[in-house]
Image (cartoon, rainbow, N blue to C red):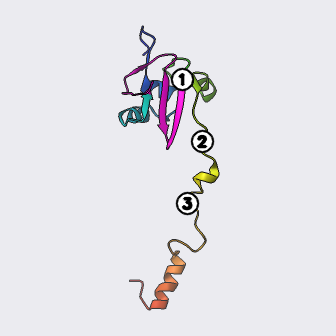
């Protein structure tokens, strides 16, 4: 895939260094405008070379990496980490993001047992 000019497709490289889980997700991120190479929106087939800055928005967080090595095949996480220099800002602390999906007991939808007692209270039949 790498050509004589020493470039690799940006979608392929993002997938190979494990910034995104699938090659198609990397292509979608490019088409959706979530990938920038040297500050310019990148199309999936755009080439990246050593020294380019790649910015990828992943799950609401921006990853900023500088290309250190060009690879086309997906590799293990320790090897992938050697292929780029991570310049990303640190993730927000857990206290600011807040817990997700935790409710007080009894809040939310009634259980089947609770629903039956409510129906009994109001004198409604099940069917």
Snapshot quadrant of residue 98:
bottom right
What is the x, y in percent for residue 93?
63, 47
In the structure shown, which secondary structural element does the residue marked by tag 3 occupy? loop
Residue at x 48%, y 31% (from the top left corner)? 55
Asked if one can make out residue 16 in the rendered structure from this viewpoint, the answer is yes
- Which one is earlier in the sequence, the residue at label 1 or at label 2? 1
The Cα–Cα distance between marks 1 and 2, rounded to whole angstroms, is 18 Å
The Cα–Cα distance between marks 3 and 1, rounded to whole angstroms, is 36 Å
Q: Which residue is mark 3?
A: 101
Q: Which residue is mark 2?
A: 91
What is the x, y in percent for residue 107?
55, 72
Crowding at dot 2, Cα within 10 Å, few <14 / some 14-19 / many 20+, comes out as few
Q: Which residue is mark 1?
A: 66
What is the x, y in percent for residue 113?
54, 79
- Which one is earlier in the sequence, the residue at label 2 or at label 3? 2
Nearer mark to the viewer, of 3 and 1: 1
Residue 40 marker: none
Residue 44 in the magenta stretch? The answer is yes
Q: Give the quadrant of the N terminus.
A: top left
Asked if one can make out residue 18 in the rendered structure from this viewpoint, the answer is no
Residue at x 64%, y 27% (from the top left corner)? 78
- Which one is earlier in the sequence, the residue at label 3 or at label 1? 1
For the record, the magenta segment spans 37-65
């Amino acid at each position: 895939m790498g050509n004589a000019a020493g470039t690799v497709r940006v979608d392929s490289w993002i997938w190979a260094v494990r910034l995104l889980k699938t090659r198609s997700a990397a292509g979608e991120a490019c088409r959706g405008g979530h990938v920038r190479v040297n500050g310019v929106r990148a199309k999936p087939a755009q080439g990246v070379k050593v020294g380019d800055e790649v910015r990828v928005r992943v799950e609401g967080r921006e990853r900023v990496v500088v290309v250190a090595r060009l690879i086309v095949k997906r590799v293990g996480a320790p090897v992938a980490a050697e292929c780029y220099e991570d310049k990303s800002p640190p993730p927000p602390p857990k206290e600011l993001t807040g817990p997700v999906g935790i409710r007080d007991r009894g809040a939310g939808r009634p259980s089947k047992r609770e629903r039956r007692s409510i129906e009994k209270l109001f004198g409604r039949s099940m069917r």
